[in-house]
Image (spheres, rainbow, N blue to C red):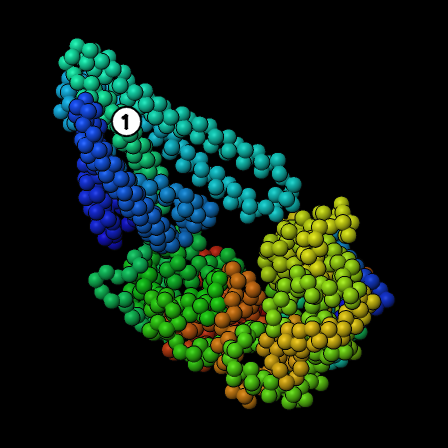
């Protein structure tokens, strides 16, 4: 099994060969032994066929020997295939194991390591670089054993046939054995260079791509090309030399081994002519000798894979050969349950380049006390908080948590006792729920919602409310489109309350909601929705399929809509590409775009074509693409194009026409919007409204939320919606959430863990006043005297009730005490607060 | 309001109108068209009913406003009492500084009639700014110049009415 004690970066390449593969490797060995036997047999048969069957003109013997020959060949092929399968298994499993172990190690490396490492570099190491060593592990047993055994077997057979001939023809190999390593050294030298150059090359690409706006902004194509070309040229040169050496090995090997038959012809031919050797024996000898070549070649290839693998492997492991600053888990004890006291004594923190970020810091906190750190940015307040939280390794003095020195604690000890909300919290791709449970899950080592020790739904809802993200989650829930037959109860309630809701809130919300009205154009619905005005029950009428639904296309033609829609769409595509063409695929840019980030490239091409071609000359495919875009156009959202009044009227008329037609032709196809039916193509909120929200204005949202919450409470549906909302996908790096939402989510995930010591590093900077106040009140009422809080503060109006306030400047604490004491002292805090 | 109601007789899109507006504000007027289009695209229009607040004192709402129609009253609460500072009318742009960094409002802005504003949020502005890093200096210049000329005007027109406040002049010296 894998050795847990030796860090992955210290493991030798050979240690992977058997790690976790013992059974497979043994099985492999057994098969190889049998296979080698099956390999020599045909040679003997070959000799007997010539010497006995053909010479004696015995047909029975001919069939017998040929039969055995065939059997042996088939058997050999089957075994060979089996070996390949096992080798592949070992290779892939080992590569996967290396990747997992190395990744595990990389995640634990000190933060300083990552400041100097490009993400592209790590990607390259974990993907490309580890494949060669993986290949080696697959071959490490099979290749040398198979080929050595085969060589030995053939050599023995040769000696048995004719010792003199055998000795002469094998005399070449010692020369090869001497020569190859010499050449291989050259290969290795260039391989090392190649790995380094490839690394620089990847890092360069990664840097250029992430800085692409800079390059394009500056039109610095030539500069970047020069930098890149230089690296490519260097790589080219190295690769050529590398290949030359590699082929040198191959050619030298090929040349010397083909000298073998030459010697046999001369010597064997002479012996046969002299009658000292049977012709059959000479044939067998030649044939056996020829077969020496394959295992020998494979052996040399293996040798090369081994050398390459070793070089790449060592290079990769060396790069990551840093000790994690802290052990992950305690070995001979349970993780500490620390009390919440914090003692900082004469703490200093000096960077590698000698800059003193913290100097002579002394702070003492009883369990349950709250400390505010204030000062200008750069004063060291965040650094101090992060030193206490073990994210920075302090270089002098002490930090004691519950009497334990922080630098001696394991990560597990810290995680079990401390929670840190970072200045710029990171939200991971996944659902709200997964992000909420991130810290708790990490603490209990859980793998899913059902893991033991995780908070209950009630706990979660309480924290959602405390941090103020409740309304956001509620909105996500309300904006969910339910699948058919999902949440039947909810659906029934919504239909039931819809009319009451409209009666009670309709007027108040009329400014913010566009109600579905058969006789009005819906500016916040798509053209398709405006035409169909119902939920499609057949796939062919789903919005995405309309542009290739012949019935619908025919209808558009009859309604005189095809041309105007195409022309509208062309303008829409032009404008959208013009604005968004060079922007990254972040949701903030695409929220108001009819074209998604994945489609942008296609539409760029289309727009390019439109520049040169008239609309009616476009291909059918392009027409389809444009029509699809037109049908998605929502004038109230996609502001780059205005919907002409004439077209609006045409569409409105077409709506009635479509209804008339489809009721006649295919009455099952569409369920028209009506107050008595749930609309499955619309969100829950739109279903309650029987309309669509017009605005994202916060005040409007708040009014909508208030009325919706009232309704949900009355109908006992709040929890259901919150649960649905927690399945909202937040996008890569949480980019579908606003900065405030991200911060609230980050606070919520730590609150949910309820750590003994809470470190907040400007954790509420992106929040609105209300949320900040709410969280501050919560800390004061629910956390004080129970949980220790260290808060790096960016707003001075929140610090009055902290037990201690420390004012920092240039890495030192200038003054520390209660708010009132410091104000009375008329020192630095007094100045900062701006009292006159 | 929505685009088609407004565009009944005018085929220009809301985006084009936004663009025209931004080009008239000191904050955006010096920017290249490519960036300006993106900002115009990221703006939204919001309607405030009479007596609704566009923003409130002490809050960091992180939004800049341009009044398209209607009017609003700038107010400040001091020692318990609210004071009207002045009226803000059509064409006024408020909140350039809020786009640049976290600042809490020193005033409240209340709609005195139904008002429609063009609104740009700091978060969107910041994300877009990352795509056009070279325009940052232009914005800084515009803001610095605006502060300077504001104080210059103030000194020219009102300095003699200042009395005790005199010693607090010099915002352009920050």
Instruction: Report the side of A509 relative to A84 (left or right).
Output: right
Mark 1 burial class by Cα count in 10 Å: few <14, some 14-19, many 20+: some
Q: Residue at x 50, y 30 (%)?
A: A233
Viewport quadrant of the C terminus of chain A:
bottom right
Q: Residue at x 70, y 60 (%)?
A: A627
Q: How many marks?
A: 1
Farthest right residue in view: B9
Q: Is residue A129 visible?
A: yes
Q: Is residue A39 above or below residue A162?
A: below
Q: Between residue A405 and residue B64, name the one nearer to us.
A: B64
Q: Residue at x 81, y 61 (%)?
A: B12
**Disc 1 target residue:** A293
Instruction: Report the side of A566 relative to A487 (left or right).
Output: right
Q: Is residue B140 visible?
A: no
Secondary structure beneath dot 1 equals helix
x and y, in percent, of residue A247 in the image: 38, 26
x and y, in percent, of residue A241 in the image: 42, 26
x and y, in percent, of residue B90 in the image: 81, 69
Q: Is residue B135 above or below residue B113?
A: above
Q: Between residue A685 and residue A748, name the one nearer to us.
A: A685
Residue B83 found in image quarter: bottom right
Q: Chain of mark 1?
A: A
Q: Residue at x 46, y 71 (%)?
A: A433
Q: Between residue A625 and residue A659, name the one nearer to us.
A: A659
Q: Between residue A336 and residue A210, name the one nearer to us.
A: A210
């Amino acid at each position: 099994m894998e050795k847990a004690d030796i860090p992955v970066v210290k493991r030798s390449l050979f240690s992977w060969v058997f790690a976790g593969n013992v059974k497979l490797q043994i099985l492999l060995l057994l098969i190889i032994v049998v296979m080698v036997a099956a390999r020599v047999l045909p040679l003997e048969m070959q000799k007997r066929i010539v010497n006995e069957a053909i010479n004696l003109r015995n047909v029975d013997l001919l069939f017998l020997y040929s039969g055995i020959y065939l059997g042996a060949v088939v058997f050999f092929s089957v075994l060979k295939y089996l070996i390949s399968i096992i080798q592949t298994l070992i290779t892939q499993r080992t590569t996967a194991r290396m990747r997992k172990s190395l990744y595990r190690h990389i995640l634990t490396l000190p933060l300083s390591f990552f400041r100097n490492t490009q993400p592209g570099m790590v990607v390259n190491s974990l993907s490309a670089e580890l494949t060669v060593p993986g290949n080696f592990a697959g071959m490490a047993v099979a290749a040398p054993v198979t080929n050595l055994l085969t060589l030995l077997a053939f050599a023995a057979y040769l000696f048995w046939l004719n010792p003199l001939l055998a000795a002469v023809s094998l005399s070449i190999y010692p020369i090869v054995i001497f020569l190859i390593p010499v050449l291989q050294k050259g290969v290795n030298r260039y391989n090392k260079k190649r790995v380094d150059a490839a690394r620089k090359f990847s890092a360069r690409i990664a840097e250029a791509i992430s800085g692409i706006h800079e390059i394009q902004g500056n039109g610095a194509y030539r500069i970047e090309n020069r930098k890149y070309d230089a690296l490519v040229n260097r790589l080219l040169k190295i690769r050529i030399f590398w290949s030359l050496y590699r082929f040198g090995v191959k050619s030298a090997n090929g040349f010397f081994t083909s000298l073998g038959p030459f010697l046999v012809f001369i010597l064997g031919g002479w012996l046969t002519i002299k009658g000292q050797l049977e012709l059959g024996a000479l044939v067998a000898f030649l044939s056996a000798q020829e077969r020496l070549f394959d295992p020998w070649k494979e052996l040399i290839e293996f040798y090369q894979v081994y050398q390459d693998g070793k070089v790449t492997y060592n290079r990769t492991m060396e790069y990551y050969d840093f000790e994690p600053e802290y052990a992950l888990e305690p070995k001979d004890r349970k993780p500490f349950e620390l009390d919440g006291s914090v003692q900082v004594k004469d703490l200093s923190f000096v960077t590698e380049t000698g800059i003193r970020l913290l100097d002579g810091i002394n702070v003492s906190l009883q369990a349950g006390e709250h400390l505010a750190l204030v000062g200008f940015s750069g004063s060291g307040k965040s650094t101090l908080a992060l030193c206490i939280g073990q994210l920075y390794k302090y270089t002098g003095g002490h930090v004691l948590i519950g009497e334990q020195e922080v630098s001696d604690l394991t990560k597990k000890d810290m995680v079990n006792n401390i929670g840190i909300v970072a200045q710029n919290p990171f939200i991971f791709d996944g659902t709200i729920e997964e992000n909420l449970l991130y810290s708790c899950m990490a603490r209990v080592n859980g793998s899913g919602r059902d893991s033991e020790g995780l908070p209950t739904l009630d706990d979660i809802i309480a924290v959602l409310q405390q941090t103020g993200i409740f309304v956001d989650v509620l909105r996500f829930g309300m904006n969910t489109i339910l699948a058919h037959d999902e949440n039947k109860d909810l659906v029934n309630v919504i239909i039931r309350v819809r009319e009451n809701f409209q009666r009670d809130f309709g007027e108040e919300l009329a400014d913010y909601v566009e109600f579905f009205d058969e006789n009005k154009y819906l500016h916040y619905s798509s053209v398709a929705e405006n035409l169909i005005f119902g939920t499609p029950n057949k796939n062919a009428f789903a919005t995405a399929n309309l542009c290739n639904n012949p019935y619908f296309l025919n209808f558009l033609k009859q309604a005189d809509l095809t041309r105007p829609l195409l022309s509208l769409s062309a303008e829409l595509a032009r404008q959208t590409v013009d604005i968004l063409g060079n922007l990254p695929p972040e949701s903030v840019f695409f929220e108001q775009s009819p074209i998604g980030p994945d489609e942008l490239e296609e539409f760029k091409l289309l727009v390019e074509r439109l520049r040169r071609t008239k609309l009616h000359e476009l291909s059918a495919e392009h027409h389809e693409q444009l029509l699809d875009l037109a049908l998605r156009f929502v004038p109230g959202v996609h502001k780059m194009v205005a919907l002409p009044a004439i077209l609006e009227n045409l569409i409105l008329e077409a709506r009635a026409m479509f209804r008339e037609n489809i009721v006649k032709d295919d009455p099952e196809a569409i369920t028209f919007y009506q107050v008595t039916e749930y609309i499955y193509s619309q969100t829950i909120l739109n279903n309650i409204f029987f309309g669509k929200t017009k605005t994202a204005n916060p005040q409007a949202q708040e009014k909508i939320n208030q009325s919706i919450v009232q309704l949900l409470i009355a109908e006992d549906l709040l929890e259901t919606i919150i649960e649905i909302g927690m399945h909202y996908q937040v996008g890569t790096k949480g980019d579908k959430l606003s900065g405030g939402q991200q911060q609230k989510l980050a606070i919520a995930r730590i609150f949910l863990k309820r750590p003994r010591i809470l470190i907040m590093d400007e954790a509420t900077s992106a929040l609105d006043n209300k949320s900040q106040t709410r969280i501050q009140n919560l800390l004061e009422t629910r956390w004080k005297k129970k949980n220790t809080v260290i808060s790096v503060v960016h707003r001075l109006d929140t610090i009055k009730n902290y037990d201690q306030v420390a004012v920092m400047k240039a890495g030192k604490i200038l003054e520390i005490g209660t708010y009132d004491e410091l104000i009375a002292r008329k020192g630095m805090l007094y100045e900062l607060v701006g009292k006159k | 309001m929505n685009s088609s109601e407004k565009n009944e007789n005018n085929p220009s899109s809301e985006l084009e109108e936004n663009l025209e507006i931004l080009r008239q504000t000191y904050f955006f007027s010096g920017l290249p068209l490519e960036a300006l289009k993106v900002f115009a695209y990221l703006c939204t229009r919001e309607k405030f009913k009479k007596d609704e607040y566009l923003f409130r004192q002490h809050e960091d709402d992180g939004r800049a406003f341009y009044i398209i129609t209607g009017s609003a009253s700038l107010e400040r609460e001091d020692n318990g009492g609210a004071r009207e500072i002045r009226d803000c009318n059509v064409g006024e742009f408020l909140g350039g500084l809020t786009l640049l960094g976290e600042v809490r409002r020193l005033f409240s802005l209340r709609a005195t009639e139904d008002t429609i504003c063009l609104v740009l949020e700091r978060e969107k502005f910041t994300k877009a700014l990352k795509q056009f890093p070279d325009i940052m200096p232009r914005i800084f210049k515009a803001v610095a110049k605006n502060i300077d000329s504001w104080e210059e005007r103030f000194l020219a027109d009102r300095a003699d009415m200042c009395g005790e406040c005199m010693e607090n002049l010099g915002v352009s010296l920050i």
